[in-house]
Image (spheres, rainbow, N blue to C red):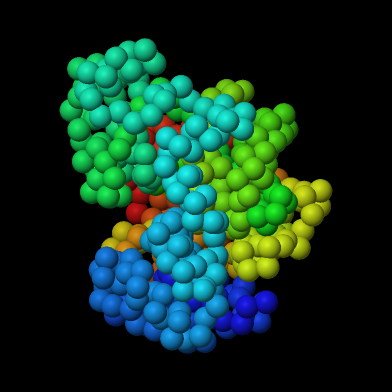
Amino acid sequence: MIKRLLIANRGEIAVRVIRTCREMGIETVAVYSTADKENLHVKLADQAVCIGPPPSAKSYLVKENLIMAALRTGCQAIHPGVGFLSENADFARAVQKEGLIFIGPDPDVIDLLGDKVQARNTAKKYGLPITPGTEGAVSDPQAAVAAAEKLGFPVIIKAAAGGGGKGMRIVRSAAELPENLAIASREALANFADGTVFIERYLENPRHVELQIIADGNGTVLVLGERDCSVQKRHQKLIEESPSPGVDDDMRRRMAEGAVRMFRELKYRGAGTIEFLVSGKEFYFMEVNARIQVEHPVSEFVTGVDIIRQQILACTEGRLEIAPDSVHLHGWSIECRINALSPGKVTRLDVPGGPGVRFDSFLYNGCTVPPHYDAMVAKLIVHGPTRERALARMNRALQELVIEGIKTNTAQQRWIINHTTFRSGQFGTAYYGEIEKEVEHVH
């Protein structure tokens, strides 16, 4: 067992990792920018090291500073959290080069899965269905038009190295394609330092479903159920739930069999997700996120598994504490992401409680939410025996949640989960766009 671990991240995910490490008897070292000096993760960690000024490019994304902080504080491992450098193979290699353990997959696996073109080909190799698309990258406008016409419009242009909606454009006619190809490539280059794009057939209003995976790198692969992430605002997830209302037992089994085959052959180590688009009774591979996900708590609620604990054990000791046949889903879990709509000082925080309620956050009374980072400041997660009971619990918990001093989307989230379409469970990724004008007027 390692004795000390550095968390190369901030905010609620850093707090989450600290809490599990404390239960495991592992000391933690937090890193922070000058804007995060009073952040909760800094207060909770055993040690804290300042790594630079507020901009991420000068602090949380500076590999050398993170590794130096780990070495100077006697850490044996680095946990990258989510975002920032969590899927950066070069960072993982640099960590390993210094004799430290990277809490994540092997760098070569990160490279393979981080390139969406290669990931599609890998998924196809292991028998997973993929959305029809180009075999490789596309840069020539004429070739792109020819490929799109063969696939059939509408199509979607995607960044090979991307995610989060960056470098992504939906195109509905040949006339629109050349301009959108150039825009997508520029966006990809600006956000991921790689302008490579490819084209897929665009599925209208599919569900976005992902499987939570945890693997030990030695052939044991656990599937901790699926999550539905279809409620998205411009490709940014807002609400997640497990299980998915659109997945039946047969689809769940077929998804899991393909995922286990792929992750086992890759000798995958740690936590990860494999993501699918679901249209009717069919599903199509989309991508792999080779890291822990923001929405992992809903999977923890329905399985009773501490995913961060298993991730650390897999990456430091090559083992898991759970056998594949011991994983069973119980009840229903829903997560609402609480986003700050303005920076500022939190003057009042009332956290909801009661049975089956969890609040993951870095907020506390008197803390300051800086303007420099992701808008998400908290996650409200509930669990109940059925979807109906879980929704009732979420509605109650959102009513109890009070955050003053900054504006948040709490009221909007409550409006969404009480909307007729969401309650019915019959919705896809186009759902938020259909109700967006109504939601934006909720305060």
Q: Position of residue 261 (x, y in %)?
A: 67, 38
Q: Which residue is more in the foreground, 381 or 226?
A: 226
Q: Quadrant of residue 321?
A: bottom right
From where the camera sits, is residue 325 visible? yes
Residue 241 seen in render: no
How many numbered circles are shown? 0
**Which of the pair 427/230 is nearer the observer?**
230
- Provide residue 57's location: percent of width, then percent of height: 27, 65
Residue furthest to the right: 325
Q: Is residue 430 left or right of residue 303?
A: left
Query: Which residue is at a point 49% across and 51% down the rendered structure image?
Result: 108
The residue that appears at 45% across and 28% down in the rendered structure is: 205
Name which residue lies at 25% across and 36% down: 184
Task: Give the position of the C terminus as an image quadrant.
Answer: bottom left
List x then y, in percent, for residue 1: 67, 77
Could you say where residue 431 lies in the image, as x and y percent from the top left?
43, 34
Q: Is residue 353 above or below residue 366?
A: above
Looking at the image, residue 294 sits to the left or right of residue 244; the answer is left
Taking 281 as reference, is 210 above or below it?
A: below
339 to the left or right of 34: right
User: Closest to the observer: 201 or 380?
Assistant: 201
Residue at (36% x, 44% y) in the render: 162
Q: Nearer the viewer, residue 147 or 23?
A: 147
